[in-house]
């Protein structure tokens, strides 16, 4: 098994990955809050986490990956204040919360499919796990880590020796980032305390509520991930992933409540993907262009161009998005696919030569998921002194991690289809022009096609066309 070195937010350094159980990886990912479309900045995290999972698989690990779907409890501020995001979505679109959840959950997985992001082994909506949340909260109350106040149940961060295990930033700075529109909640004993169960909110009432020992209400956002992870992956988690904005308060709170509940260390590695920024700063749903996968498609970009764009940079560097850099990725991607698609299939594999590149590729990914270095290995393969069949086999193998469809001729076929549709349309227009005795227009069409390298011929069977070489 190849060594995988990863930056661990917990230790703040790159370290060799060692799993709890030999050969197995238990991996948890914070899923989307399904109240709106995902913007491409959110999807950067999911792309890089997909590469991480596939790197483990490539290295021979048996991976079990779990992701939640947040369909209740996530408020407009991550620090438990503001309005419930699901309810905001429902009001915006005059639908029920469950309709909103179903619609945006499907939209999220449609985006993932287009980006070749594998669906995790377990996908669990929060609303499926209310019993687990209640059980966990009850134990936290019983052991003195939680308290009730003003109708809500809070986690008592004052009970912990260390609360800020994931970050060495100052408390004040952290609170600013989490607070957007926060008003101090008078029920809290410590200002970092967070809600485990709500029965009271100053905003409009939740549509979705459940009975609990503390009254009819709904769970907080943070408890969802801890309970869902423990439900499906047990008490020892190998790796937990998310966007960098989840470090505080969300992941910090997850660690606090999980370890208080379990009574021991919970997760060994924390993997965080940096932001995608646009020209205005951090990308968000509320300002500037709302950049989504369908919008990129409308503008003529294959979603895999965006995946390529993400892979060209390291996940721990902030990435700046604009259409010029995406155009560069598009040119690079189309060239790459064209080259790999033209590689011949027949021929004996040159195993010895291939092994050198397999080694290089594994080394690149094992070097803290260095995807741009891994892409360089792909280019090295294309330039190598090796037969086509070996090159194709290698690139197909690497694509099990990169997932860029490099050897599928899909792109070329698509280009061919749209060309054919265009030419047929022009021929039809020319026929119409000739019927109307508009020979100038008919000649202009023939000329236009010729300039694009397409020759048409009028035969007894009709007009045929060919691409000039
Ligand atoms: Zn989470």
Image (cartoon, rainbow, N blue to C red):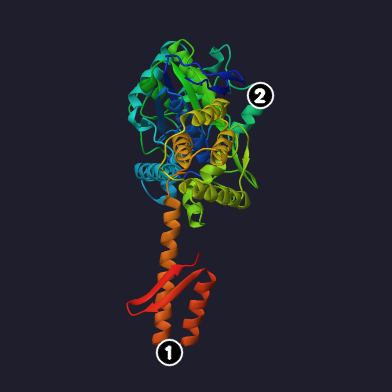
Relative placement, left or right, of 255 versus 142 is right
Counting every numbered tag in the picture gives 2
> Relative to 9, is 103 above or below?
below
Local secondary structure at mark 1: loop
**In front: mark 2 or mark 1?**
1
Image mark for residue 437: 1
Q: Is residue 129 left or right of residue 326?
A: left
Mark 1 within 8 Å of ligand 1, using the beta carbon: no
The spot of residue 194 in percent (x, y) is 51, 24
Where residue 104 appears, x then y in whole percent?
40, 44
- The residue at the far bottom in this view is 437
Of residues 260 and 21, which is closer to you in this image? 21
Inspect this view and state whether residue 76 appears: no
Residue 115's mark? none
Give the residue pinned by disc 2: 169
Q: Within 10 angstroms of label 1, few (less than 14), some, or many (20 or more) residues?
A: few
Residue at 43 percent across and 21 percent down: it is 25
Contact, mark 2 vs mark 1 (Cβ under 8 Å): no
Report whether residue 327 is seen. Answer: yes
Q: Where is residue 205 in the image (x, y as percent from the top left)?
A: 41, 38
Q: In this view, does 261 lie above or below 127?
A: above
Where is residue 278 drawn, in percent x and y? 62, 46
- State how far apart marks 2 and 1 are (Cα): 77 Å
**First along the sequence among labels 2 and 1:** 2
**Closest to the observer, 251 or 3:** 3
């Amino acid at each position: 098994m190849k060594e995988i070195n990863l930056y661990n937010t917990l230790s703040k350094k790159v370290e060799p990955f060692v799993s709890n159980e030999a050969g197995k990886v238990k991996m948890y990912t914070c899923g989307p809050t399904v109240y709106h479309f995902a913007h491409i900045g959110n999807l950067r995290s999911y792309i890089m986490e997909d590469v991480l999972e596939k790197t483990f698989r490539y290295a021979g690990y048996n991976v079990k990956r779990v992701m939640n779907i947040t369909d209740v409890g996530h408020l407009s501020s991550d620090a438990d204040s503001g309005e419930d995001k699901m309810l905001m979505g429902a009001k915006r679109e005059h639908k029920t919360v469950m309709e909103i959840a179903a619609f945006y959950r499907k939209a999220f997985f449609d985006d993932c499919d287009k980006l070749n992001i594998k669906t995790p082994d377990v996908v669990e909506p929060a609303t499926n796990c209310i019993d687990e949340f209640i059980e966990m909260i009850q134990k936290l109350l019983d052991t003195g880590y939680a308290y009730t106040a003003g109708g809500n149940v809070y986690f008592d961060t004052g009970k912990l020796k260390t609360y800020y295990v994931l970050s060495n930033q100052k408390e004040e700075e952290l609170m600013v980032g989490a607070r957007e529109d926060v008003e101090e909640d008078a029920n809290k004993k410590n200002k970092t305390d967070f809600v485990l169960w709500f029965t009271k909110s100053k905003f409009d009432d939740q549509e979705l509520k459940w009975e609990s020992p503390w009254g009819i209400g709904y769970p907080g956002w943070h408890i969802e991930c801890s309970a869902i992870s423990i439900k499906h992956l047990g008490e020892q988690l190998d790796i937990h992933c998310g966007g960098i904005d989840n470090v505080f308060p969300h992941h910090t709170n997850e660690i606090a409540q999980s370890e208080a509940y379990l009574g021991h260390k919970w997760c060994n590695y924390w993997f965080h993907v940096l932001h995608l920024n646009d020209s205005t700063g951090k990308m968000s749903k509320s300002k500037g262009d709302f950049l989504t996968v369908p919008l990129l498609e409308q503008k003529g970009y294959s979603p895999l161009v965006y995946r390529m764009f993400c892979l060209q940079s390291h996940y721990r560097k902030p990435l700046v998005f604009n259409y010029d850099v995406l155009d560069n990725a598009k040119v690079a991607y189309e060239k790459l696919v064209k080259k790999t698609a033209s590689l011949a299939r027949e021929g004996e594999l040159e195993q010895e030569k291939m092994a050198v590149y397999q080694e290089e590729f594994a080394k690149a990914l094992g070097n803290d998921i260095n995807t741009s270095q891994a892409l360089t290995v792909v280019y090295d393969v294309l330039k190598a002194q090796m037969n086509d069949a070996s090159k194709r086999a290698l690139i197909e193998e690497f694509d099990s991690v990169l997932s860029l469809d490099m050897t599928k001729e899909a792109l070329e076929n698509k280009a061919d289809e749209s060309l054919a549709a265009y030419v047929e349309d022009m021929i039809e227009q020319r026929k119409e022009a000739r019927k109307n005795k508009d020979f100038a227009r008919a000649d202009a069409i023939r000329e236009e096609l010729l300039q694009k390298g397409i020759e048409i011929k009028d035969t007894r069977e009709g007009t045929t066309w060919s691409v000039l070489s």
